[in-house]
Every structure is written in structure tokens, then in C-alpha cells.
Image (spheres, rainbow, N blue to C red):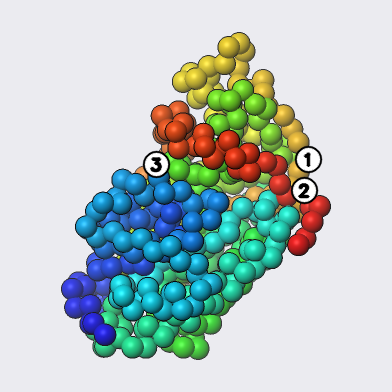
Amino acid sequence: MGGHSRYHARPDGRFSFIVKVLVTGGSGFIGSAVVRNAIGRGWDVVNVDKLTYAATAGSTESVSDADGYSFEQVDICDAAALTSVFERHEPTAVMHLAAESHVDRSIDGPAEFINTNIVGTSVLLTAATEYFDRLDESGRHAFRFHHVSTDEVFGSLGEEGAFTVDTPYDPRSPYSASKAAADHLVSAWHHTYGLPIVLSNCSNNYGPFQFPEKMIPLMIISALRGDPLPVYGKGQNVRDWLYVEDHAAALLEVVSGGEIGQTYLIGGGAERKNIDVVHALCDILDKLAPPASGSHRDAITFVSDRPGHDHRYAIDYAATTAALGWSPSVDFEEGLRLTVEWFLANEEWWAPLVERRDAVTRRGLGTGSG
């Protein structure tokens, strides 16, 4: 199998350029941002995506004709299909973003999260390890398996402090538990089988192409449609918000410059109460798409809270900045405005998703566990 000799080594033994990266979940929200950014850097990209409900072809349309872009519709639970993809494309690295990711859906139906996020990750790790073991020396030196995870694996914070790489795992939802299990599997494959891995955990993402079921796009779209703006509980839960393009840039730094076996935390430095985020969105929309009368704030409706709703997340990403030179470049107010402007300009992207109604139906009321 090829040696991937085109990568550029650094004096510290790491490498600074990926020849070809296999991105799982590359048609999803964060994955598509990674794909677009990687192609923009001149990397070759193999997008491996099952195309579930949350994946959209339009999210990678801008790079679909690029010379270095390939697409494979494959389920990460399909071992034979994954083996074939590795053999045909010979990637230098894997960036694993394919996952079921909506907390509310995990409350209603945890089995799918366990299957995709845990079983699927183990199948992908096995295929990657078998491929890695067949590489020659230079190929093995270059190869990386980057697992992309969430800060939700660390549980809930009090009023002070922030997650660090030393924070114990304490997942509270089926989603976060499945991601925590996947994190541990990736670490185990490194220690047991010698797979060269890097791992990252991020705070809440927002930005263009986010599926309408998530809070920020749901609020924007609901306001544009004249629907109520449902806020869980009293809106006092706190999240650290990270613009998706900043996250994608960080992930490319992690996979190309991260130290094998290490975890990197990626945050936006933008802690906000949910109600404050909704108020900010309403104020932007009042200027860019005002309602017939009054303010979009008038449509805010407080609804029953999510079961086990974590109070606060915050990430200390100083170590990532020190190691990789990355820090977020888009502040929250600018990112929120850019996001609203994108949804205003791209109704043809989100309107068909909303018409399915599945995209904006309230979930996670704790009425089922199948």
C-alpha cells in the first residue's frame, strides 16, 4: 500500500499537511464545514456519509466539483463498505464526525445513538486499524485518526469554572453517554492497538447549514415563519457558543498538528444564557426582518424543560491555543448576525427541511426509551 510521501514533516516529528483526509459525517453541519475548509486548504477529501435526516447535499455543493473531492454514501456500521473505502482512497487521516447528535432525540430513542455513536465508532476504528497496519513506514508515520467529540461528556458545571482535559467524564443524557463511550473506545484503540489518535471536545456550535432542530436555527426559522419561539424552562441554562467555521479551522489544526494520544478542547469563549441568545436573535431579526407589529420577542414562549437538562457548559481552550496557535476569530455578536443573514438568504435550503415538520417537532419529553 502507498507510502503517502507527499506529507510535510515538521522538526518536532509531527506533520503539517494532510494529503487526503477521510471525513465521516461530511454532509452534516460541522462535517460539511470541515470539508469546505479542507478543500479550501488544498487537501483531498473523501466525504463518507450515510445521508441521514440531518445530512444535506447542499452543504457541500460549493466544493462538489473540486478535483480533490470524493463522496461515498456509506454507513459507518458497515464494515465491508468501510474497508472498501479505505482500500480505494488510501487516506492519510480520518476525521470522525459521523454521529447522532440531538439530545432530545436521544431521550426519545437512545438505541439509534448507541448503534451509530458507539457501535459505528468501533467498526470504523477496526477498519482504520486494519488499514493502518498495512501501511508502509512513511504511511504509518503520517496517519492520524481524529475523533471529534463534545463537551457534554463532562456533564454539568456550577456557576463557576470550566471544563479542562482533566475534568472527569460525567455524561447526563443518552447522547452524551454515547459520545463518552466513543471517546473511551478511541483511547482504548490507541493504547491497545497502537492506532495514532487525536481527540477533540468542543462547545456548542452554530452557524450556516445547521439543521433546524437545533436551538439557534429553530429560533430564526420560527421567527421568520411567525411561529412561537419555544424556550426550555426559564432559559437560564448556559452554553459556550462556537462559530462553526472557527471550529472547522481548529479541527484541521488538531488533525495536522496535534500530538498523538492527546485531547484538545475547542471553545468559543462566548458563554450565554439561552434566553439571552434568544433575545439577541430577536433583536437582530427586528432589524433585518421585522414582524408586522411589535418585536419578535413577543413570540417567546416558555415550555417544559428537557429532562436532566445540564445547567452550564464552559470550555477552557487555553491549552489548545498554546499548543496549536488556534483561537476563535468570530465573536458571538458577529457570528449570530452572520448566521441570521445566512438563513435569511438561504430559505431554499431550510424551507424543504421545515416542510417535513420532522425537523421542528418538539422532542425529548422523556416519554420513551426505545
Is residue 241 shown above or below 20? above
Q: Nearer the viewer, residue 198 or 291?
A: 291
The residue depicted at 21 percent of the width and 72 percent of the height is 7
Q: Where is the N terminus found, in terms of image quarters?
A: bottom left
Q: Which amino acid does label 3 sit on?
A: Val
User: Going from the N terminus, do you reach mark 1 or mark 2 first?
Assistant: 1
Residue under label 2: 365
**Residue 355 location, quadrant:** top right
Can residue 103 be seen at all in this image of the molecule?
A: yes
Residue 273 is left or right of residue 131, and the answer is: right
Question: Which numbered mark, 2 or 3, is in the foreground of this view?
Answer: 2
Do tag 3 and tag 1 residues touch (Cβ < 8 Å)?
A: no
Label 1 vs label 2: CA separation?
8 Å
User: Going from the N terminus, do you reach mark 2 or mark 3 first?
Assistant: 3
Is residue 226 shown above or below 195? above
Is residue 81 shown above or below 47? below
Residue under label 3: 330
The residue depicted at 41 percent of the width and 29 percent of the height is 345
Label 3 vs label 1: CA separation?
32 Å
Q: Residues within 10 Å of mark 3 (few under 14, many from 20)?
A: some
Do tag 1 and tag 2 residues touch (Cβ < 8 Å)?
A: yes
Residue 255 is left or right of residue 6, and the answer is: right
Q: How crowded is mark 1: few (under 14 residues within 10 Å), some or many (20 or more)?
A: few
